[in-house]
Amino acid sequence: MEPGHKIQHVEMPPSLGYVDILIHSGRQFIGALEECRDCGLASSWSILQAHANVTWMELLCVILCALAWTGLRMATTTWIFQPFIKWCQLRPKEADKVPESAWKLLFYSCSWSYCFYLLFFTEHNFFHDPPSTFHGWKSRVTVPKEIALVYLIQGSFYAHSTYATLYMDAWRKDSIVMIVHHVVTFTLISFSYAFRYHNIGILVLFLHDINDILLEFTKLNIYFKTRGGKHHKINAFITDIGSVLFSVSWFWFRLYWFPIKVLYVTCCSSLESNPNIPFYFFFNILLFLLTLMNIYWFLYIVMFVVKVITGQVKEVNDVREYDISEDQKMEIQDHSKSSTSHKDTINTKQYMSNGYLKKKRV
């Protein structure tokens, strides 16, 4: 899948506004699609073989690290998070949610901080000059070790997260979308590394991880504000501040900076550097899909803010957790009210997983 040879070189005029950039990027993408003369599967396979480069050792490292993330999460939950939860005397409802949020906060804080260091304290000045991510691009070049480390950490983590969403995390109404998000992200990470689009990849990770930090930090304060059977105003205050920062940062990083610094660059500046840049449509379609999911979750945020303002929700809560499907609520309620069902569950060795009853075979 390669765009045609007649694409005009495009620069990023500082006078263009947000909407203009989106429209210009879309037109450039459509124009490249119209001029694509050889975009079939056979051509894509030949381009993949010619430009992609991932070794078996690198794949093995990703698999081993994904397993390591799962083991590390279990270990930190057992030896750190659960003892701390017990010491804080959290209610069972909140205690069940803390390990997931604490684990994600720990990971995203470390990963984002390292990306921040690379973008602002090294020669990788891609945040202030996004078009430079494609300057001098060549396939099969050696990826700098510091960036390769980010890709190994992030790629293996999202492989782990796909499994964790199914079997370790609390099941929510948008969990299916979350799984799609993890698959899309893992695909983008894998292919951007293989095609040596790692420079723009670092920028994508930086613009997304900050929101996860604020989200999980805010959720933890929600859970801890009722610790010890008392209401703690300091956690409630931090929750309010965190919710505002999370909402603003989501719009600013994912819905404003991401289109300007990433989508425009991948749609336009990439063609300026190389009119025949490989897998142009593949990457841009995935990036646009990622944008649509960001918009989808932003609607959750807006809906929650509206409910708080109109008094439908009296206090700040997790925008993903308050909207559990009614079927799941009824199933959980019926299960908790029926002692007979509970005994049958024990006798048949069933267990609760993601809000549903599943049979456990022994």
Image (cartoon, rainbow, N blue to C red):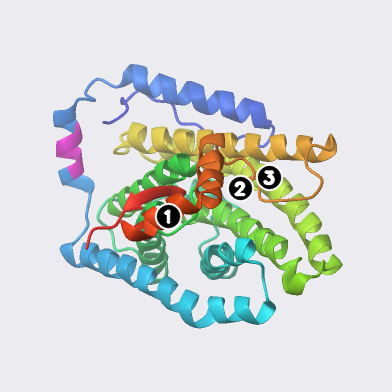
Q: Which residues are magenta?
A: 44-48
In magenta stretch: residue 58: no
Q: In this rendering, does residue 164 appear at all?
A: no
Q: Position of residue 353 (x, y in %)?
A: 41, 54
- Find disc 3 in the rendering and name its residue: 252
Q: Main secondary structure of the magenta part?
A: helix
Residue 158 image position (x, y, % from top left): 39, 56
The residue to which callout 2 is attached is 321
Residue at 82% x, 66% y is 231
Q: Residue at x 76, y 59 (%)?
A: 239
**130 relative to 36 in the view: left or right:** right
Q: Is residue 225 left or right of residue 358?
A: right
Taking 322 as reference, is 327 above or below it?
above
**In the rendered image, which quarter is residue 105 located in?**
bottom right
Amino acid at dot 2: Glu
Choose the circle earlier in sequence order: 2 or 1: 2
Distance from label 3 to label 1 (Cα)? 38 Å
Q: Residue at x 61, y 40 (%)?
A: 323
Q: Secondary structure at mark 2?
A: loop
For marks 2 and 3, the one nearer the N-term is 3
**Residue 352, labelled with which disc?**
1
Q: Where is residue 117 shown, x and y percent of the image? A: 57, 69
Q: Is disc 1 placed on a helix, strand or loop?
A: strand
Q: Type of residue at label 3?
A: Trp
Residue extending farthest top: 34
